[in-house]
Amino acid sequence: MVRSTESSELLSLDEVLETMADVYRRRVLVEMLDHNPQDDDDVQLPEGITIADDDLATLRTQMRHVHLPKLEDAGLVEWDREANVLRRGPRFEEIRPLLKLMDDHADELPDDWI
C-alpha cells in the first residue's frame, strides 16, 4: 500500500508491522534511532550485521527497489536517490518507541528480529 506522508492520521499497527516485516528494514530503522545520516558523515552497518559477498549485490538491489521505497512510502525515511542518502522521515517519531523497545531488548529477542 502506498501511503501519503502528508496524511495527518497515525500509522496503524498493521501498517507498521507490514513495513517492519523484513529484517533489513528493521535494521535500517533501528540504526536510525541513534544515527540520523543527515548528521553523520560515515554511518556503518550496525554491529552484528554480516553479509556474504555473493549476497551483497542482491541486497543492494533489494534495498534500492524494495526496502527503501517501502520505508519512504510509509514516511519513515526520506531517501535522496541521487546522493544515496537516508534521513529520518516525517513519520519516524511515530515508531520510535517500538524501535527503542526492540533495541533495548535486543539480547532477549530472536537473532533475526533486529
Image (cartoon, helix red, strand yellow):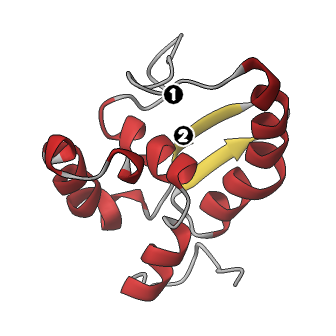
Q: In the rendered image of this protein, does residue 21 appear above or below residue 61?
A: below
Q: Pick whichever, 108 or 34, lies toward us.
A: 108
Q: CA distance from mark 1 to mark 2?
A: 6 Å
What residue lies at 68% left-to-right and 51% top-to-bottom?
Answer: 68
Direction from residue 83 to residue 47 in the image, left or right: left
- Residue type indicated by callout 1: Gln
Q: Pick whichever, 30 or 106, lies toward us.
A: 106
Direction from residue 58 to residue 87 in the image, left or right: left
Q: Position of residue 36 (x, y in %)?
A: 43, 32
Do labels 1 and 2 touch, CB within 8 Å?
Answer: yes
Graded by Cα atoms within 10 Å as few (under 14), some (14 to 19) or many (20 or more), the crowding at tag 2 reads some
Q: Which residue is mark 2?
A: 87
Direction from residue 29 to residue 102 in the image, left or right: left
What residue lies at 79% left-to-right and 35% top-to-bottom?
Answer: 60
Residue 106, picture quadrant: top left
What residue lies at 71% left-to-right and 80% top-to-bottom?
Answer: 2
Q: Which residue is mark 1?
A: 38
Q: In the rendered image of this protein, does residue 19 appear above or below residue 42?
A: below
Q: Position of residue 18 (x, y in %)?
A: 53, 76
Question: Which residue is farthest top?
Answer: 42
Q: Position of residue 42 (x, y in %)?
A: 53, 11
Q: Is residue 83 visible?
A: no
